[in-house]
Amino acid sequence: MLDTNAFDTGTLRLFDEVATSGSFTAAAELFGYTQSAVSRRIAALERAAGGPLFERLARGVRLTPAGEALHRHAVAVLDRLGRAGEELAAIHGGRGGTLRVGSFATANVDLVPGALKRFAERRPGVELRLVEGLTARLMDRLAAGALDVAVISDYPAGLPAEGARTVLLREDRLLVALPRGHRLAAYEDVDLRELAGETWIEAAPRGQPTLLVTACAAAGFTPRSGMRVAEWSGKFGFVAAGLGVTLVPELAARAVPGDLVLRPLRGTAPARKVYAALPEAPLPAALELVEMLGEWKVCTTVSPT
């Protein structure tokens, strides 16, 4: 039975050198050992292997059939260890491995794709994987070790207090989306009070506090609720049909269709904060991506009339 305790990496490298050079002396000179030290280590390896690995010749040594079999495996092991070392060095240097990224839906309109494109151009050796989800779910995955970085927001549930390092990326203000024929569409910006009589297309259930409700309360009125539509892209169709107006995150401005216009709100517009969340010991590649996320200029062009 093979005693694997004797097969440490140093011994395998010594065995490979003796097998390749056919000489204990050459191996001793390469590794800085005495010839007797090499002989003792090879003898210990032979005992662990259950029999002779080398034929001792008048000048040098030659592998036995058992030695040839072990040498094939030793070379494979050393090769795998060498490749593992290269891969680990690439991961620790941010040049290789896999980077698992999570983000919420509207961040995937412009912010995340733009930063990932730049990252992929700079680090082509890093494989990128993306998961989309709500902030709470992304934080659960981050805590479980299933994500390396997550793009999250503090709305609607607030920023998770524990379990990750967070880096503020930007403030995502909300714009109002109007049909092109709307009475306020020609203005550069809109006072929220001018929308007091409008019907609002919202996602949240009635009675649940939202950025819209909070902002309207500060403006002195309660917004009139209309259709309930969960997805931002679905709201656009209702607004285009003249069934109401809606708020659109600045992050999603690029996705707004051409038959709508976006207008900023005068005064203190409702907004949410967008963060990158990282584990306590983040990968260098994750830190580099967070830097790019913070630098990426999201398309915030307000639609012309």
Image (cartoon, grey):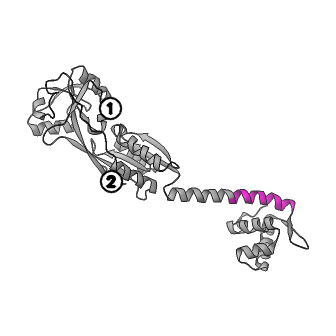
Among numbered discs 1 and 2, the one appearing first in the sequence: 2
Q: Which mark is residue 198?
A: none
Give the image location of residue 112, x and y in percent. Answer: 38, 43
Q: Which residue is tagged 1?
A: 255
Specify whether residue 244 is painted magenta.
no
Q: Which mark is residue 167?
A: 2
* Foreground tag (1 vs 2): 1
Give the image location of residue 175, x and y in percent. Answer: 22, 35
**Is label 2 in a helix, a strand or a loop?**
strand
Q: Residue at x 45, y 42 (%)?
A: 130
The span shown in magenta is 64-78
For residue 68, above or below residue 117: below
Q: Residue at x 79, y 71 (%)?
A: 42
What kind of residue is marked 2? Val
Mark 1 surroundings within 10 Å by alpha-carbon count, few (fewer than 14), some (14 through 19), many (20 or more): some
Residue farthest along the right direction in this orientation = 58
Q: Main secondary structure of the magenta part?
A: helix
Looking at the picture, tell me which residue is in the foreground, 70 or 291.
291
